[in-house]
């Protein structure tokens, strides 16, 4: 620990709001002697403490790394602006919460990439740590800056700033990576020498080992590698099974309140539904389940160890677990007896779900959430969202009959092939739900409220819609106005997202190496914590586009040709491009593809790993 | 009802944990221990546990008291061990004992607290003593205090509320050891002493240059630990 830092820190912490988030020392946080460990690692979350500590992935990797005697994993978060200002004023670098060591003294700092709008914050944290922001400017003395997480599937916007990306499931890859590092550090290898070895590991992408050649129109001519051992493409690392994989049953318990202070159990990874807009549904394939017994064991241990008062399941679609009903009933019983509240997110609203929700009285707290995503059957078929009108109204009717008073609907607008008829469809569903309420609850309609939330569609890499154009901000604006008009009703609350953020998100979601200049400019101008409306500065972003010369439309509103080479194809999600293309073509015909639990639909992942749930549906 | 008092230190960086968060930390620890904390009756039951005196954010302490009630009796020694295991490492339980008393709450019996105020000071101990002596020699020692009821700032004389003091020098700091009134009858926050002393002494210091530590808490005669 650095004495200097702690003395300085004392003066800073007396002047900032909620100093408790900058101190570490929580129950279950790990303390080791950095002098005694081979690899000093800092896990960095590019958002504030309260957000980062609610993220399960941090707790998993913290455990995975600290379970190894030779590795010490510490943590750092983006400080709130009052703290950052003071740190910069006083010349205090970003430090680890555990030992208050400057990040600069670490062997590695690793960022998790959860959302595109956190990218400027990553640059900011690197800079606040006193580490050169661009990888090319770093020396042997600087730590290795690595990154992983869902946004690493298109790593290119960050290629200048990150030394090395780890792609895919981290539970096995990260320890293999740090083991190799420890071994090579002992033999005195340079960072370059280490990366040349590391790039042979499946899932490791070192951007400086590759070059990208472009056509005159700015599209990609060729992706090439500059180092022989580098892989092209880099296949993602896949954990064959999650049943036995490391899981933190004794997670760190924050002393200041985090956004979610609750026990979480991941019931399964992956999804078989094949919604065509959904990146998670593609990049986390195949479905890998934890058994019901394992889920129970992890839940109980965690509740015992933490005293959490809430338990939540985590997966892309709770009800799809093979043993969901039995598992849910077990969980209802055990949480009831412990006076713990149970959260079952992303439920399929069938009879069973209503039964469970009645029992846990979830509806008292939050309303019924339903995500049809699109307003007409045609468009739902286009996006392959397997929900029918009948499904929606049957559930809503049941909900109303059971006394729910708040229903929330989620839609996306700007989806491929969308017309105003589809928007009318949204309004129609909303209106019919209101009618249904009058029918059930009588003329006055009770305390009923319907929330209609609309988000702007952002085409994502590695999805069947990766070729699609995003709507222009103008078109989004017109559609919002149109809907606002159509949804004018005192029972309906209409929410929609900011148009500008979805454009920036879209640039980075499918950005190439050239977009790194935009990111750099934006950060230089002072953008950070862009996901927070109070920090988000659209004016600075506009300025950044001008300064960097990055053409927004090229990335957002341009439809890609079927044979265009994509920047993200340096990384192989192991779902085949042919499958994605076939799905895109089917989308144009509004032809659906069934959930592959009912039979493999040939996404290609089973070339790499056994699909334990493919084609085996247990109803 | 079995009633207990835990005495603990707020060390290291836990001085930056707020009163409310600290309460949550203990609640959480009791929960993990599976301790049968007693809850109040009523519409919104809350656990029967409270601190003797809240500690300002940023103060460390050698002597904090938490009182709590359980449904069944427990062995204080094993309770202490168990609790220590479930708290953040810088919250150290120094003592835990059964508390059979007629008093309603410890807080109501608070009488005075002893603090150490660390003032960065380059001069000698004598120089600092002279300075502090002349501060204390004022007829009135006035400070602005925010009034609870009216929320306005009012000038108050704090001299009589400083029960005793002595100064010394430790390294780069001058240290003021003082005992101040505490509790509902008469209360003096070290903040008012610091503010008025910095104003008086004209020392080129900001509030955040100073550290404060609570050393001891004193209670009325009705409490015998
Ligand atoms: S390989 Fe077949 S079964 Fe497995 S995820 Fe892909 S489509 Fe589904």
Image: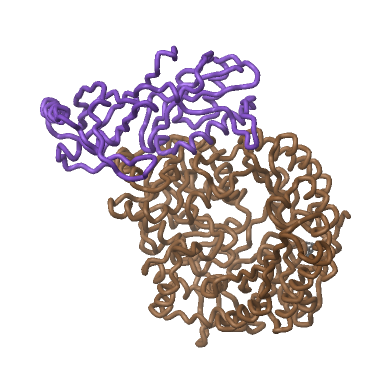
Reply above or below: A200 against B137. Answer: below
Drawn side of residue B195 relative to residue A110, left or right = left
**Quick check: can you spot residue A270?**
no
- Residue A424's image quarter? bottom right
Q: Nearer the viewer, residue A361 or B95?
A: A361
Q: Quadrant of the N terminus of chain B?
A: top right
Name the residue: 51% across, 57% down: A147
Which colouring convention does the figure follow? by chain
Q: Quadrant of the C terminus of chain B?
A: top left
- Residue A380's image quarter? bottom right
How many discs mark residues in the rendered view?
Answer: 0
- Which chain gets the brown colouring? A
Drawn side of residue A244 relative to residue B121, left or right = right
Name the residue: 82% across, 64% down: A600
**Quick check: can you spot residue A285?**
yes
Q: Name the quarter showing ligand 1.
A: bottom right
Reply above or below: A545 against A600. Answer: below
Residue A617 on image: x %, y %: 86, 57
Drawn side of residue A575 relative to residue A528, left or right = right
- Residue A135's image quarter? bottom left
Name the residue: 58% across, 22% down: B69
């Amino acid at each position: 620990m650095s004495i200097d830092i702690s003395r300085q820190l004392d003066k800073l912490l007396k002047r900032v709001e909620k100093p408790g988030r900058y101190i570490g020392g929580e129950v279950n946080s790990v303390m080791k002697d950095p002098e005694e460990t081979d690899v000093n690692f800092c896990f960095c979350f590019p958002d504030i403490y309260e957000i980062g500590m609610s993220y399960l992935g941090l707790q998993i990797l913290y455990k995975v790394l600290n379970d190894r005697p030779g590795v010490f994993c510490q943590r750092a978060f983006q400080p709130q602006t009052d703290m950052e200002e003071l740190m910069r004023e006083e010349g205090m670098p970003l430090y680890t919460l555990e030992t208050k060591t400057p990040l600069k003294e670490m062997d590695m700092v690793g960022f998790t990439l959860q959302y595109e709008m956190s990218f400027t914050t990553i640059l900011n944290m690197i800079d606040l740590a006193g580490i050169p922001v661009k990888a090319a400017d770093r020396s042997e003395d600087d730590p290795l800056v690595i990154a992983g997480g869902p946004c690493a599937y298109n790593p290119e916007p960050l290629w200048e700033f990150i030394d090395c990306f780890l792609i895919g499931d981290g539970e096995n890859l990260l320890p293999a990576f740090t083991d190799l590092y420890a071994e090579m550090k002992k033999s005195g290898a340079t960072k370059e020498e280490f990366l040349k070895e590391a790039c042979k590991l499946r899932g490791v992408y070192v951007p400086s080992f590759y070059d990208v050649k472009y056509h005159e129109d700015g599209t990609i001519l060729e992706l090439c590698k500059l180092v022989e051992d580098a892989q092209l493409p880099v296949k993602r690392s896949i954990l064959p099974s999650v049943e036995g994989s490391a899981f933190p049953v004794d997670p760190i318990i924050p002393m200041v309140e985090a956004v979610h202070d609750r026990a979480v159990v991941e019931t399964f990874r992956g999804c078989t539904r094949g919604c065509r807009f959904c990146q998670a549904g593609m990049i986390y394939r195949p479905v890998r389940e934890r058994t019901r017994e394992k889920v129970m064991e992890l839940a109980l241990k965690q509740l015992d160890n933490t005293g959490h008062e809430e338990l939540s399941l985590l997966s892309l679609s709770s009800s799809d677990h093979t043993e969901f009903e039995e598992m849910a009933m077990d969980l209802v019983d055990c949480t009831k007896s412990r006076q713990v509240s149970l959260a079952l997110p992303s439920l399929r609203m069938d009879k069973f779900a209503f039964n469970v929700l009645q029992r846990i009285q979830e509806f008292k707290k939050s309303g019924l959430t339903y995500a049809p995503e699109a307003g007409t059957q045609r468009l739902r078929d286009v996006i392959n969202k397997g929900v029918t009108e009948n499904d929606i109204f049957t559930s809503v009717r049941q909900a109303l009959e059971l006394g729910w008073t708040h229903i929330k609907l989620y839609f996306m607008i700007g989806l491929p092939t969308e017309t105003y008829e589809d928007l009318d469809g949204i309004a129609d569903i909303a209106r019919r739900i209101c009618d249904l309420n009058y029918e059930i609850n009588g003329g006055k309609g009770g305390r009923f409220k319907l929330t209609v939330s609309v988000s702007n569609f952002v085409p994502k890499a590695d999805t069947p819609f990766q070729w699609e154009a995003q709507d222009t901000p103008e078109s989004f604006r017109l559609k919002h106005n149109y809907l606002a008009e159509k949804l004018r009703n005192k029972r309906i609350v209409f929410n929609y997202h900011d148009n500008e953020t979805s454009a920036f998100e879209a640039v980075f979601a499918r950005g190439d190496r050239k977009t790194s200049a935009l990111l750099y400019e934006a950060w230089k101008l002072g953008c950070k914590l862009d996901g927070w409306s109070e920090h988000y500065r659209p004016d600075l972003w506009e300025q950044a586009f001008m300064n960097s010369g990055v053409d927004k439309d090229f990335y957002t509103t341009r439809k890609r040709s079927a044979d265009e080479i994509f920047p993200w194809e340096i990384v192989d999600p192991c779902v085949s491009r042919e499958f994605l293309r076939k799905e895109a073509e089917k989308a144009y015909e509004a032809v659906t593809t069934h959930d592959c639990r009912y039979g493999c639909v040939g996404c290609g992942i089973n070339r790499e790993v056994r699909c334990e749930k493919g084609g085996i549906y247990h109803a | 009802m079995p009633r207990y008092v835990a005495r603990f230190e707020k060390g290291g960086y836990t001085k930056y944990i707020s009163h409310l968060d600290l309460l949550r930390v203990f609640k959480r620890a009791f929960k993990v221990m599976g301790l049968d904390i007693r809850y109040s009756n009523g519409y919104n039951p809350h656990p029967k546990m409270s601190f003797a005196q809240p500690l300002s954010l940023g103060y460390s302490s050698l002597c904090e008291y938490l009182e709590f009630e359980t449904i069944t009796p427990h062995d204080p020694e094993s309770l202490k061990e168990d609790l220590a295991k479930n708290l953040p490492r810088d919250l150290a339980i120094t003592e835990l004992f059964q508390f059979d008393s007629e008093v309603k709450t410890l807080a109501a019996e608070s009488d005075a607290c002893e603090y150490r105020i660390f003032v960065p000071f380059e001069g000698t101990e004598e120089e600092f003593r002279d300075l502090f002596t002349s501060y204390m020699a004022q007829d009135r020692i006035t400070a602005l205090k925010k009034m609870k009821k009216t929320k306005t700032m009012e000038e108050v004389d704090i001299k009589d509320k400083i029960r005793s003091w002595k100064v010394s020098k430790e390294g780069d700091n001058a240290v003021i050891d003082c005992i101040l009134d505490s509790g509902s009858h008469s209360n003096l926050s070290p903040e008012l002493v610091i503010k008025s002393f910095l104003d008086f002494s004209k020392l080129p210091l900001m509030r955040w240059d100073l550290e404060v530590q609570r050393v001891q808490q004193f209670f009325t005669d009705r409490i015998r630990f």
